[in-house]
Image (spheres, rainbow, N blue to C red):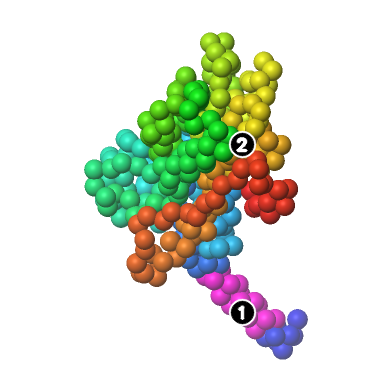
Amino acid sequence: MDKRMFAIFACFAVLLCGCVKKAQPATEASKDDQIVVGFSQVGAESEWRVANTESIKAALSVENGYELIYDDARQEQENQIRAIRNFIQQNVDYIVFSPKLETGWNSILQEAKEAGIPVIMIDRDIIVEEEDLFTAYIGSDFRKEGEKAVVWLENLLEKQGRTEEPIRIVHIQGTIGSSAQIGRTSALEQGIKNNINWEMVAQECGDFTRAKAYEVMGAILEQTKDIDVVYCENDGEALGAIDAMEEVGIKCDANDGVIVISFDATRLGLEYCLKGKIALDVECNPQQGPYVDAIIQKLERGEPIERENLIEETQFDCFTITQKMIDDRKY
């Protein structure tokens, strides 16, 4: 190789190396710029919960500038506490979690506070000793959801001329101690106090699952089949209760059978509502990912945020629901 060719080759090599060296820091910088979020989901017990998880994952994606560390607690509070502690040890930028229960979070959230990591709760609320142990709450007003259901039932029974005859109610509760269970339960119990002809004939925990609700409803039906209303605290429980009732020949129908009330308004729940098997389905919106993203972006810019962020929700009943309403849903 002559000197001229060697010089050209050497220059080309230097330029090539320079390009490689410049490209590497750019890649590292983009990764360093990602916002790291630890997300502890309570579980995957229902269609609603799966939709909620997917909403968070979609909003806090790599494409949107996030690194999401996801943990499924499998319905155990201990697993959530362990996951949050791991997030703290990994020095994440933010912690997002949907708490199984309202209580039992003071110590772990104190650890997050001391580490300087903002905590955002979704779906369910908690009770803490100090308000500044978490930064924001995104979710539903569960008491208001229950009150909507009670008012709707009162109006239906009035239209049917059943304001004086005994109304026998079976109540299938969600996970005991969760804010969804507490809010929806308290609304029904107040409704029973306000309506002297309403009677609670059974109150059992269905743990927000179809299988457990089917089991407890089956046990209730062995004791009595004289039932006017079944109030379930989510769609999974409503489907399980309907399964059990239909097995013994009980018709679920708002006009001519048992009135089934449910919460969540998942696609499957609304399909049952369209068939008339679920009389009322009060929406609990799982699309909370965009709300989380919006709050994090405000915090990143140093802007003030609302501590409580309640999501707008509606309700569907078997008299007015249409297939188009179901088709237009995002979940």
From where the camera sits, is residue 46 visible? no
Please state which of the two labelled residues, at mark 1 or mark 2, is closer to the viewer. 2
> Does residue 25 sit above or below 160 in this rendering?
below
Along the line of sight, the residue nearer the viewer: 107 or 326: 326
Residue 151 counted in the magenta span: no
Along the line of sight, the residue nearer the viewer: 86 or 18: 86
- Magenta segment, which residues? 9-26
| Secondary structure beneath label 1 | helix
> Does residue 284 sit above or below 103 in this rendering?
below
What's under tag 2, amino acid-wise? Ala
Q: Main secondary structure of the magenta part?
A: helix
User: In the image as oriented, which residue stretches furthest toward the right?
Assistant: 1
User: Residue 146: x and y, percent?
Assistant: 46, 40
Residue 10 counted in the magenta span: yes
User: Residue 117: x and y, percent?
Assistant: 34, 54
Residue 193 lies in quadrant = top left
- Say which residue label 2 marks: 279
Residue at 37%, 63% in the rendered image: 305
77 horizontally vs 287: left or right? left
Residue 15 lies in quadrant = bottom right
What's under tag 1, amino acid-wise? Val
Residue at 58%, 34% in the rendered image: 160
- Say which residue label 1 marks: 14
User: In the image as oriented, which residue stretches furthest toward the top?
Assistant: 222
User: Residue 55: x and y, percent?
Assistant: 57, 51
> Does residue 302 sit above or below 146 in this rendering?
below
Which is nearer the N-term, disc 1 or disc 2? 1
Which disc is residue 157 wearing?
none
